[in-house]
Image: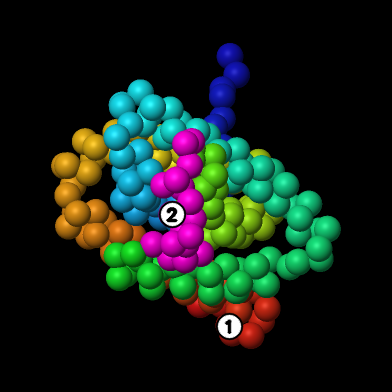
Amino acid sequence: MGEWVVMFDPHSVSLAGLQHSAYVRFSALALSSIFFLVDPFAALPTFLAVTAGADAKRRKKMAWKASVTALVVLSAFAVAGQYIFKMFGITLPAFEIAGGVILLLIGLDMLEAKRSPTQESHEESAAAARKEDAGIVPLGIPMLAGPGAITSVMVLVGQAEGEWKKMAAILAAILITAAICYLVLGNSDLVGRRLGETGVRILVRIMGLLLVALAVQYFVNGMVDLGVIAKP
C-alpha cells in the first residue's frame, strides 16, 4: 500500500492568516467609520422634534423611510465609487485628504455634542419640523446620509481597489448601519428615555473623538500615498 505524504507550508498558512486579518481590520474600519458618520443617536433630538405628536406607527414609518433612503444613497455611491473616480480623474490620496478634512470638522463639532452643519443645518431642521413626511428629505438625506458619510464610503471604495470581499464588507457595513438607524429612530421615545439627554451627549462625544482620530488617519494615509511622508 502507498503512503500518503502531507506537505505543510508554513509560508502559505502565514499569508492566509495575514490576508484574513487585513480583511477583518478593513471590515471593522468600514463599519465604525460609516456608523460614526451616520450617527443615528445624534439625529435623535431632530427626529423627536419632527415626529412630536405622532403615534408609534407613523414614527416607525418615518424611521423606515429615513433608514432605507440612507441605505440606497450610500450603497449607490459604494457601487458607483470606482466609476466616479475614473470619470472625474480623482485619485484616492486626494479623496483621503479631502475626506480627512471633512471628517475632522464633523468630529470637532461632535466633541461639543452637537450636529455639524455639514450634516444638519438649522434651516433643514426647521423645514423638517414643518413637513408632513420628512422621512426621505431631510431625515434620510442629508441628516443620515450626509457629505461625511458619502465621503467615507468613497474613500473605503478606493481602498478596496475592486476586491469583492472588501466591497462586500462596505455594503454589509451600510446595511448594518441602516438597520441600527431604524431600530434607534423607530424606538426614539424608548431610546431617548433610557439614555437621557446626558447619555446621548456622552455617546456623541465618544463617537466624535473616534471620528477625529479616523480623520487624522485618512489624512496621513493620503500623505503616505502621495509620498509626502514615509509609511509608518
Front residue of 164/40: it is 40
x, y (%) of residue 195? 18, 47
> What separation in Å lies between label 2 and label 1 (alpha carbons)?
47 Å
Which residue is at a point 59% across and 45% down the rendered structure image?
Answer: 74
Asked if residue 28 shows in the view, the reply is: no
Q: Which residue corresponds to mark 2?
A: 126
Between circles 2 and 1, the one closer to the viewer is: 2
For the residues labelled 2 and 1, say whether their Cβ atoms are less than 8 Å apart: no
x, y (%) of residue 65? 50, 33
Which residue is at a point 41% across and 47% down the rendered structure image?
Answer: 129
x, y (%) of residue 187? 29, 33
Q: Which residue corresponds to mark 1?
A: 230
Q: Is residue 135 left or right of residue 161?
A: left
Q: Is residue 25 left or right of residue 48?
A: right
Q: Is residue 120 magenta?
A: yes
Question: The residue under label 1 is which amino acid type?
Answer: Ala
Which residue is at a point 56% across and 24% down the rendered structure image?
Answer: 4
- Badge 2: few (under 14), some or many (20 or more) residues near its Cα, within 10 Å? few
Front residue of 14/232: it is 232
- Badge 1: few (under 14), some or many (20 or more) residues near its Cα, within 10 Å? few
Among numbered discs 2 and 1, the one appearing first in the sequence: 2
State the quadrant of the N terminus. top right
Q: Which mark is residue 32?
A: none
The vertical placement of 78 against 33, above or below, is above
User: What residue occupies the far front of the structure in this picture?
Assistant: 130
Q: Is residue 25 left or right of residue 44?
A: right
Question: The residue under label 2 is which amino acid type?
Answer: Ala
The magenta stretch is 115-133
* Residue 54 image-quadrant placement: top left
